[in-house]
Amino acid sequence: MRKKWYVIQTYSGMENKVKEDLERRFQSLGLERYVGRVVVPEEIIIDSKAKSLERHVVSMNARLHVSTGAEVKAGEILAEEPNIHARKDGVITEIKNFRRIVIETIDRKYTKTYYIPESDKPDRGLKVGARIRQGMPLSKKGDQFAEIDGKIVVVERLKRVRVKTDDGEEVYYLPYENFDTTRLSKGMEVKAGMLLSEGKKYYAKSTGKVEVMDMGTRKEIRIAKTKTRRLFPGYVFAELLLTDDIEQLVRRAPNVINFVSIGGQPVPLKPREARVILRLIGEETYEEKRAARVEFDFNIGEPVKIISGPFEGFVGVVNEIDPEHNEVKVMVTIFGRETPVVLHVDEVEKVV
């Protein structure tokens, strides 16, 4: 006899618990030959809201552990910068705490990096995403000022190490979290090639889908948060060789209500119905895994505000949505004429 697919009704929210419990019961009783797959059909939803995106800016020399389209979980490594080695022989003359601030122009074509001593008390408002105007002081001391309009894309703490050499001085900026006070100290001699610090590592803070953007002078790793949604809440699908004993074992499992039945008898899915379910969740071996679906918080015809890029501040109407490329076409009125502008979904937000 061949196994057939049956639908088991459960209490809502307990689907995965029922799946795990059934698999454990079959295995512990040595009944694996009576059961195939047990699945809870789900789909992956990508949250396209700009505020939900996680961003990491890395150098062009960084080693990437992910690529566009990859799915990552919170805590997984995304990239790591090269280790930092001494370029010349010398003696450490100073070790000081610094803050690195990177400001990006609105059109994302140019960045400016500032190194501010912590002793100068960098402004508390200098956070990733903050809007910066040219001439704005970057610290309480006021020795450094923003030279461009834009947004802050990087804020990180560093250790600046000065090394006096025979022909001058070398300056190194080391990741604060990797600095080892037992290895490096003022007055210590260093040799060319000596490891001063491991490169900074970047980890995902949330679960989501990756997009890697090459910005010319740097790379930006974006993570669009994802969530799973049950396609059939309250139901578990099981591939079974149904005997009286198997039926009773399933019925008596915790949080199981019943089989989907007719006249009290479990009704198997037709092969065509089972294939539809399996293809829907990417379980068919000859089918490609079903791509994550992008969930937009706006529809065609609705007004949106452009929040970054050269058209920042403009309000337009959504004309087209391209889920495959995470892009939208927005009709913006410029000099009295409607102009179509193609934007990434993280560059717009719904007008409420």
Image: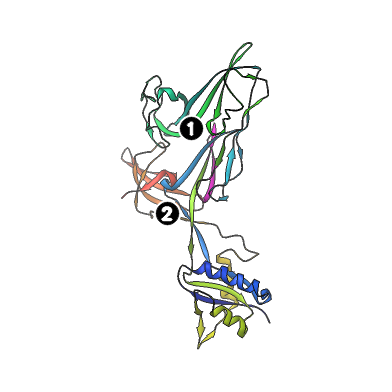
Front-most of residues 94 and 256: 94
Which circle's residue, 2 or 1, is located before the other in the chain? 1
Q: Main secondary structure of the magenta part?
A: strand
Front-most of residues 322 and 136: 136
The answer to whether any part of residue 8 appears in the image is yes
Residue 43: x %, y % from top left: 51, 62
Extent of the magenta region:
203-220
In whole angstroms, how far apart are the C-alphas of marks 2 and 1? 32 Å
Q: Which residue is mark 2?
A: 296
Which amino acid, mark 1? Glu
Residue in view at x 48 percent, y 65 percent? 230
Residue in view at x 58 percent, y 44 percent? 77
Q: Which residue is mark 1?
A: 156
Where is 189 relative to 254, above or below?
above
Which amino acid, mark 2? Phe
Q: Which mark is residue 174?
A: none
Residue 248 part of the magenta-drawn span:
no
Numbered disc 2: secondary structure = loop
Q: Residue furthest bottom?
A: 263
Quadrant of the frame with the N terminus = bottom right
Residue in view at x 46 percent, y 67 percent? 13
Residue 18: x %, y % from top left: 53, 70
